[in-house]
């Protein structure tokens, strides 16, 4: 399964941030104004993202800007990242949570070397879960 995130006009900025933070590569960034046959796109939405795809290794993260007037803030889910190294968990947590809202500080739990939850500066909820060796 591949997470597909929606934004309120911030998809491009978010994906550029994720590309750096996650060490991935943006492989698609299509704008509403790029649609070959055109369409009823308001001028202020022509640069909004119709579809973006970021590859991190063999994993994809996809997203777009919501249609005008149809954006809803994310709720009821977290995008989970499961690093195996506690130092990488700390780096990811620090980088991705900067400017966002912490839901649970990164810490050791009974199941994880490091676990934490937050919403990033774009409002996307993330969970870092670096499990203990079994």
Image (cartoon, rainbow, N blue to C red):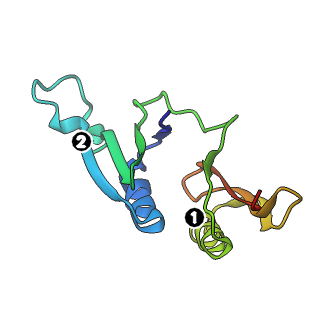
Q: Is residue 19 left or right of residue 94?
A: left
**Residue at 26% of width from left, 46% of height from top?**
28
Label annotation for residue 96: 1
Pinpoint residue 56: horizontal percent, then vertical percent.
41, 55
Q: Assign a secondary structure to mark 1.
A: helix
- Asked if 20 appears above or below 33 in the picture, the reply is below
**Corner quadrant of residue 101:** bottom right
- Asked if 86 appears above or below 67 in the picture, the reply is below
| Whole-number angstrom distance, CA of label 1 to CA of label 2 | 24 Å
Q: State which quarter of the image contains the C terminus.
A: bottom right
Pinpoint residue 4: horizontal percent, then vertical percent.
47, 36
**Residue at 75% of width from left, 61% of height from top?**
133
**Residue at 61% of width from left, 38% of height from top?**
74
- Asked if 31 appears above or below 54 in the picture, the reply is above
Q: Assign a secondary structure to mark 2.
A: strand
Q: Which residue is mark 2?
A: 30
- Asked if 80 appears above or below 99 in the picture, the reply is above
């Amino acid at each position: 399964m591949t997470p597909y995130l929606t934004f309120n006009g911030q998809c491009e900025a978010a994906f550029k941030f994720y590309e750096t933070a996650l060490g991935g590569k943006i492989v698609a960034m299509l704008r509403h104004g790029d649609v070959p046959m055109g369409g009823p796109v308001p001028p202020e939405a022509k640069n909004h993202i119709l579809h973006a795809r970021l590859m991190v290794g063999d994993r994809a993260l996809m997203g777009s800007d919501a249609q005008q007037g149809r954006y809803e803030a994310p709720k009821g889910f977290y995008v989970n990242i499961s690093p195996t190294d506690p130092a990488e968990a700390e780096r990811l947590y620090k980088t991705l949570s900067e400017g966002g809202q912490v839901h649970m500080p990164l810490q050791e739990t009974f199941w994880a070397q490091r676990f934490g939850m937050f919403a990033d500066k774009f409002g996307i909820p993330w969970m870092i879960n670096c499990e203990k060796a079994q």
